[in-house]
Image (spheres, helix red, strand yellow):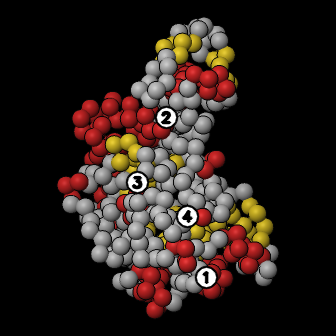
Amino acid sequence: MVSPKDFDFGAHLFAIGTKVNCRKVHVSSRRLLSLADLSTQSRCTYTRFMNMHARQTGEIQRPLIDSYGRQVNYLRVSVTDRCDFRCTYCMGENMVFLPKSEVLSFEEIQTIIAQFVARGVRKVRLTGGEPLVRRDIMKLIAALSESHLAQGTLDELTITTNGSQLARHAAELARLGIRRINVSLDTLDNALFTEITRRGRLSQVLEGIEAAQAVGIAVKLNMVAMKGVNEDEIIPMMEWAHARGYELTLIEAMPLGEVALDRADAHLSLKQVHDRIAERFTLEHIAKRTGGPARYKRVTETGGTLGFITPLSHNFCESCNRVRLTCTGQLYMCLGQDDRVDLRAALREGGVEALDAALDRAMIAKPKGHDFVAERIQTPSVVRHMSVTGG
């Protein structure tokens, strides 16, 4: 692919205009343009140039490249806002869920994913809410597996789950080509688990994790680190996970939505956690790439992998390669901002052509970074709940 820093449009003349306050730009024959050149016209035109060039050269059908040269190749899709847990950092205890009429149909989800794949997305993650509580979810996964995994157009189809429904679906997930999953698990203490999830059963989640591992699915555990809640369990969780062959990733609580958790009191910097762990264990940096924001360390004494997702103390915006589709068809270009593009409306009103144009608008609108700031964590930077965007 042509470098975003330097590209030539050959002998063609393009007139590129947008509806976001940028002037028309005329590109003459064989003129070499750089990102700096485009900035003097308007940064938003950069995406237009790259997409047109890709179409002319026969590369990926107009790859999804934003105004900062980052290619989007990872799509997270929330298939439902519903969940059988009510985790304190994720949603309100008396959460009111959307009526089914507002949720994307499986056919619409498949169409949207297919268009993303056509434009270079290589990894899709299904999220929620809890994705495995949506009725007939395995039919959607089977269709995506047949359409994309079997055809080699997707490198990976995976899910993030709370594990409650995993035991009964693990074998089928493995058969459909799901090679690895993320399971949210914040504690191994029964009482604390119930306190955090408000209604979950730890034994049910552990059973699901074991079932997934038994059929060959690699398991990564996600643990939200909360000061005064589960910070004393981080090292025991790491030792427990590594002893069983699971990866563990620690996540800073993010300022999303009005929830019961007191963010100021519960905020725990993972830099402090890292330093605390390093006092007892040897941590070696590894260049592990999974298409996500985590930075990974190898723990010499356990032989396992420990990840850190640090949106507040050390953000990951400069290499962001993903966007998030809600179950209502809203595409969020950044977890930490409220800007979005309505893909459902585009698809329903104008079909695939309008959907494709909406993806172009999304790339222009994708911000340089999020709005999460540790100094004002008590007030949510974004008012929507994590369960709405997709965990």
Q: CA distance from mark 1 to mark 3?
A: 30 Å
Relative to 91, 29 lies left or right? right
> Can you identify the residue that label 4 sits on?
376
> Can you identify the residue that label 1 sits on?
231
Residue type at numbered disc 1: Glu
* Residue drawn at 53 percent across, 16 percent down: 25
Q: CA distance from mark 2 to mark 3?
A: 20 Å
Residue type at numbered disc 4: Arg
Q: CA distance from mark 2 to mark 1?
A: 40 Å
Residue type at numbered disc 2: Ile
Judge depth for marks 1 and 3 and give the one in front: 1
Q: CA distance from mark 1 to mark 4?
A: 21 Å
- Which numbered tag is attached to residue 77? 3
Q: Are marks 2 and 4 in contact (CB under 8 Å)?
A: no
Give the mark nearest the N terminus, 1 or 4.
1
* Residue drawn at 44 percent across, 29 percent down: 20
Relative to 358, 7 lies left or right? right
Q: CA distance from mark 4 to mark 3?
A: 29 Å
Give the mark nearest the N terminus, 2 or 4.
2
Give the mark nearest the N terminus, 4 or 3.
3
Residue type at numbered disc 3: Val
> Can you identify the residue that label 2 sits on?
364
* Residue drawn at 73 percent across, 78 percent down: 277
Q: Categorize mark 2 by other alpha carbons within 10 Å: few (<14), some (14-19), many (20+).
A: many
The C terminus lies in quadrant? bottom left
* Residue drawn at 33 percent across, 55 percent down: 327
Judge depth for marks 2 and 4 and give the one in front: 4
Q: Are marks 2 and 1 in contact (CB under 8 Å)?
A: no
